Amino acid sequence: MSEENKVLSPLPGIFYRKPSPDKEDYVKEGDPVKKGDTIGLVEVMKNFYEVKAEKDGVLEKFFIENESEIAAGQEIATIS
Amino acid sequence: MPRYEYGGDEFIFVELSEEMSLEVNFQAMAITKQLKEDNVPGIVDICPSNASYMIRFQPEKIHPDDLIAKLKQLEESVSLDGFEISSRIVDMPILFEDPWTHETVMRFRDRHQDPSSTDLEYAARINGFDSKEELIQAITDYPYIASMIGFVPGLPWCYQMVPREQQIQVPKYVRPRTFTSERAFGFGGAFAVIYPVQGAGGYQLFGTAAAPIFESEQRLHDFKDSMTFPRQGDLLRFRSITMDEYEKIRKEVKDGTFRYVMKDFTFTPQQVLEDPKAFSDDVLGRLYA
Amino acid sequence: MIKVKNPGLETTVQDYGRIGYYNVGMPPSGAMDKYSYTVGNILVGNDENAASLEITYMGPVLQFQEDAVIAITGGEIPPKINGESVPMWETLSVKSGDELSFDFVKKGARVYLAVAGGIEVPLIMESRSTYTLCGIGGMEGRALQEGDELTIGTNKKQDVKEGTSLPDEYRLDFSGDNEIRVVLGLCSYRLTEDSKKRFFEREWTVTTEANRVGYRFKGERLHFMEREQPFGAGSNASNVVDLGYPIGSIQVPDGVEPIALLNDAVTGGGYVTICTIISTDLDKMAQVKTNEKVRFVSVDIEEALQARNEYRDTVEKVRQFVAK
């Protein structure tokens, strides 16, 4: 098994797992991801910041629900 | 009774009246003009408003309570008798029902009191006019006074110089819009405004001004001394124009040759309050002489 | 020259602000946390109105194209030079080619990068501060973008020794509660007694709409005294005849969510304002993040002036410490 990678939020705000309410999730638990893929959005100050995978792998688990509050440095997901 | 209130440690806010009237606007003007002439140390900004005014000051130089005492004294001593307002009469060309604000009006229909009509139709109906043309006529027949400048740089709140029973009043949007186009001509409460720059806004939208009121590059003649054009106390006449004239003015603005049609004019509050109709005829006569 | 390799979330050029144009509707802009901004300039020996970079939440990546003396102050967004951690609140020197970057924000919301000489951009109404709504000041009236090149100016008064480090007592302290002191007043007569009480009793959560223009808070609905609306005010109970808004004033449109008006806010409008954040606590407000909670504490004008004096004493002590 390859090294686990924690995806952290660089910003405080609201976390979204999908690009807009009527769209599909960017990625589901268990899906493969490539480095640079967007896995969610953080909204703050009228900006939407794209959170990206930092390595190739499988998105193992999300630690935060769609549309919930997130703190800077909080763990969003792990990629293995 | 006026209210004297602290706005933190750097502002004093004085509410002369809870309701708008020409008299109270003139009073705010007269007090703030005298304060300016008195050159009180420590005053940073003097902001006359519609029915109130606000002072920013440095408490190191003047204690807020001493400033309030000074302002109360001015309230007692300043009189509208003999108060002269050095003003300008300005022609403000407006394209009513223009395509740009119409697009905005339609886009934010769900935030409006009456989603089934346009802002102009709605405002005409609730003010008892038979048609939107009659409302436009009422807006353009009598001049307005720029009773306050603010919100964003250069935005004039304009109050029509007619008796209260003749004033047009409209509510603001139920929820503010996130977008208003540059130079949009709007109406809210008893005030007409022109939005200097694109941004949020909650006033009913009736049209677009052809000429800018804010110009950061300061290219045009009327902006040489300041990025903002309107001044408090200006007398503005909104004039309904055609698309042809609108395009002609836009071209002049682009070429840098546009100049506002305006005349310097000094008047007293009594002139306005005693006979608004005669005053208005005089103002329009001078403007287009 | 400083080259912007990555602009961060919202990095702007700011100085003390555009003061004295409130009557034409021009907000002051300027550094939101004046204390950290001022101390930064002191640590690099600048004039106290020299322009710095205000960095929010996520820092930029900057490459210095010349040797420079810098200081980083404010919240905790840990700085690194060429990938190595460097201290905040300290006079640092960087060499041409060095790259400054930042880790995730740990505490606070904003840091200031002061550069000896200041950031050189044109003066607009005697200020270099960025005001993005009207597109004036700073770097072409906007936040920094990738590829921008910033010129270092000549607003330096004196040399400060490299390694001059401020003692803890002069650094921001994040150990306490987010208590924001306000002076009640303005149109507070419009609130019901119960709502006035609730405003000070409860905690308010900062929403995602919290930027240089203002901070919006979630909590509970506030209620206004019933009245027949005065002529010209508009129909909503939270409407007044349009009036001036002090910097730091708090309004509650429709009673739904309080909004604190800050450096780039509108200068007036038609909503009831109920109180004003005292000038020293505007700095504190600027370091509160989205999703954090604050409590508003009512103080009288003498307490506000006292806080102001203490603030000035502290800045003077910092000045003396650095001059030694």
Image: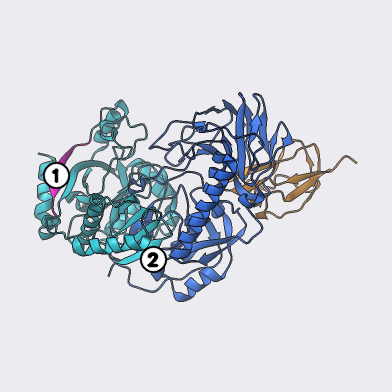
Chain colours: A orange, B cyan, C blue
Q: Position of residue B273 (x, y in %)?
A: 14, 59
Which chain hosts label 1? B
Q: Is residue B261 found inside the magenta-colored segment of the image?
A: yes
Please state the total of marks drawn on the protein image. Answer: 2
Disc 1 residue crowd, few under 14, some 14–19, many 20+, Cα 10 Å: some
Residue B245 lies in quadrant: top left
Q: Chain of mark 2?
A: C
Q: Which residue is mark 2?
A: C187
Say which mark, if any, is on residue B265: 1
**Element type at mark 1:** strand
Q: Are marks 1 and 2 in contact (CB under 8 Å)?
A: no
Relative placement, left or right, of B102 versus A66 is: left
SS for callout 2: loop
Quadrant the C terminus of chain C occupies: top right
Residue shown at 63% from the left, 43% from the top: C89
* In the image, farthest residue toward the right: A1
Task: Give the crowd class for mark 2: few <14, some 14-19, many >=20 residues within 10 Å.
Answer: many
Residue C215 visible in rendering:
no
**x%, y% of residue B242?**
24, 38
Task: Tell me the residue at 26%/42% (across/down).
Answer: B94
Kind of residue at badge 2: Cys
* Residue interval drawn in magenta: B260-268
